[in-house]
């Protein structure tokens, strides 16, 4: 456990004592957000190791916290591993959850924290907020990707070993492997529902939203729905990767990721994955950086990372994204993978234009989209919630 340092000396009229607890695999990526809260003047206590259940209880009992800030992945892990009720509800400690993935995948668990103590969910997609409001959730707040730190993602000199015309930082796994991994012990109703979603993706060439596409007689809070939603995230990701490779034609594509998928096409170059905090050289060494988004409207965090590196992001159109990075001025969007070859050829042939967009995206990120900006938004809302 540690109390995070206030590096700015800034003060607040009403500072909060905030608890955050490490529980999920990717929590280290979220630390800049907590540091930004401390820099605003809040007292932030960060439990940076996984404790047994009674360890968290003893800590909460010893200190008087105003509110807990939990990452969605951590809340999910607590709900999967702890008995009911959730101990923050039982101890009457207000808490909020901040999500970097789609909480609709976790409704089977989240139904147990539709409580007065769960004061708010911060979600990066306006369509998901509409969906969850329709399911009975309240205090839902739109907060675009909130953990991108310009000290981690920033311009660096290109590395010769990483230089590429087109780069794609992405996990690539074979579709059949993903299907076999996630569908074990499913009945024919679940398989039929999932197959319909996959058919929709193949027809549209883009991700299909599970909640919007399944018939109303599916209970969104049921375990089968959560299993389908979880599986579809990985199955659709695998298929989209295949479609990107196909869309490239014979153009070179350098894919960097941790997946086990392989391609025998001579224009596809598979590279070993890199740690999340070592991606800046990759983005800065690629003339074009591709991205694909699994959310219905959100701007994927990868777009923010690429922009933070003063690199060119070419990403699929999402309405929320277009409101955050202006199309063709701060980022480049494609509405269909059929458009990808023309976009790639255009910007490889006009590097000055690509550089102008990358520069504008970089300025937009620094002016509006850092972890410090997002935590200032969060802080204002927390002050209203406690």
Image (cartoon, rainbow, N blue to C red):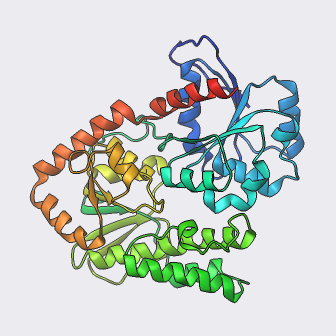
Residue 322 x, y percent position in the rendering: 33, 49
Image coordinates for residue 1, horizontal then vertical, percent:
74, 31
Instruction: Identify which residue, 216 or 178, lies in the foreground.
Output: 216
- The reply to whether residue 328 is in sight is yes
Q: Is residue 331 above or below residue 233?
A: above
Q: Is residue 125 visible?
A: no
Most distant residue in the bottom direction: 188
Q: Residue at x 65, y 51 (%)?
A: 73
Quarter of the image for residue 226 reads bottom right
Q: Is residue 260 left or right of residue 156?
A: right
For image coordinates 67% across by 74% down, the residue present is: 217
Q: Compared to 200, does 270 lie above or below? A: above
Q: Position of residue 368 (x, y in %)?
A: 37, 33
- Most foreground residue, 219 or 314: 219
Dividing the picture into quadrants, the one containing residue 19 is top right
* Residue at image location 30% in from the left, 42% down from the top: 156
Front residue (pair 28, 121)? 121
Figure quadrant of the C terminus: top right
- Total labels: the figure holds 0
Q: Quick check: 30 left or right of 306? A: right
Residue 234 is situated, as x and y percent measured from the top left of the image, at: 54, 71
Say if 120 sits above or below 7 in the image: below
Which corner quadrant of the image does residue 268 belong to?
Answer: bottom left
In the picture provided, is 301 more to the left or to the right than 73?
Answer: left
Above-or-below relation of 170 to 158: below
Q: With 21 as the anchor, is 361 left or right in this view?
A: left
Q: Please name the residue shown 47% across and 46% down the image.
A: 277
């Amino acid at each position: 456990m540690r109390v995070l340092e206030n590096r700015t000396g800034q003060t607040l009229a009403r500072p909060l004592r905030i608890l955050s607890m490490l529980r999920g695999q990717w929590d280290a990526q979220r630390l800049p957000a907590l540091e930004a809260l401390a820099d605003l003047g809040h007292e932030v206590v960060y439990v940076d190791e996984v404790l047994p259940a009674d360890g968290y209880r003893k800590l909460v009992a010893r200190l008087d916290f105003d509110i807990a800030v939990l990452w969605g992945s951590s809340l999910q892990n607590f709900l999967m591993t702890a008995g009911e009720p959730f101990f923050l509800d039982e101890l009457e400690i207000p808490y909020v959850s901040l999500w970097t993935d789609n909480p609709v995948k976790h409704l089977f668990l989240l139904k147990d924290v539709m409580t007065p103590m769960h004061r708010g969910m911060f979600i990066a997609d306006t369509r998901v907020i509409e969906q969850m409001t329709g399911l009975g959730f309240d205090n839902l707040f739109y907060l675009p990707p909130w953990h991108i730190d310009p000290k981690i993602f920033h311009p660096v000199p290109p590395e010769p070993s990483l230089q590429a015309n087109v780069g794609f930082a992405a996990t690539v796994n074979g579709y059949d492997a993903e299907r076999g991994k996630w569908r074990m012990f499913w009945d024919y109703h679940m398989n039929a529902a999932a197959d319909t979603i996959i058919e929709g993706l193949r027809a549209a060439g883009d991700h299909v939203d599970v909640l919007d596409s399944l018939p109303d007689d599916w209970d969104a809070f049921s375990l089968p729905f959560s299993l389908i939603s979880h599986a579809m995230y990985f199955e659709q990701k695998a298929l989209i990767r295949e479609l990107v490779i196909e869309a490239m034609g014979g153009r070179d594509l350098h894919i960097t990721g941790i997946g086990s998928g392989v391609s025998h096409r001579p224009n596809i170059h598979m590279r070993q994955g890199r740690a999340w905090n070592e991606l800046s050289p990759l983005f800065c060494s690629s003339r074009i950086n591709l991205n694909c988004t699994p959310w219905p409207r959100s701007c994927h965090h990868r777009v923010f990372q690429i922009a933070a590196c003063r690199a060119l992001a070419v990403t699929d159109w999402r309405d929320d994204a277009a409101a955050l990075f202006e199309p063709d001025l701060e980022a480049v969007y494609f509405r269909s993978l059929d458009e990808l070859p023309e976009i790639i050829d255009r910007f490889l042939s006009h590097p000055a234009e690509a550089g102008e967009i990358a520069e504008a995206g970089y300025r937009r990120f620094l002016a509006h989209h850092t972890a410090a900006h997002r935590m200032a938004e969060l802080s204002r809302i927390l002050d209203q919630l406690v």
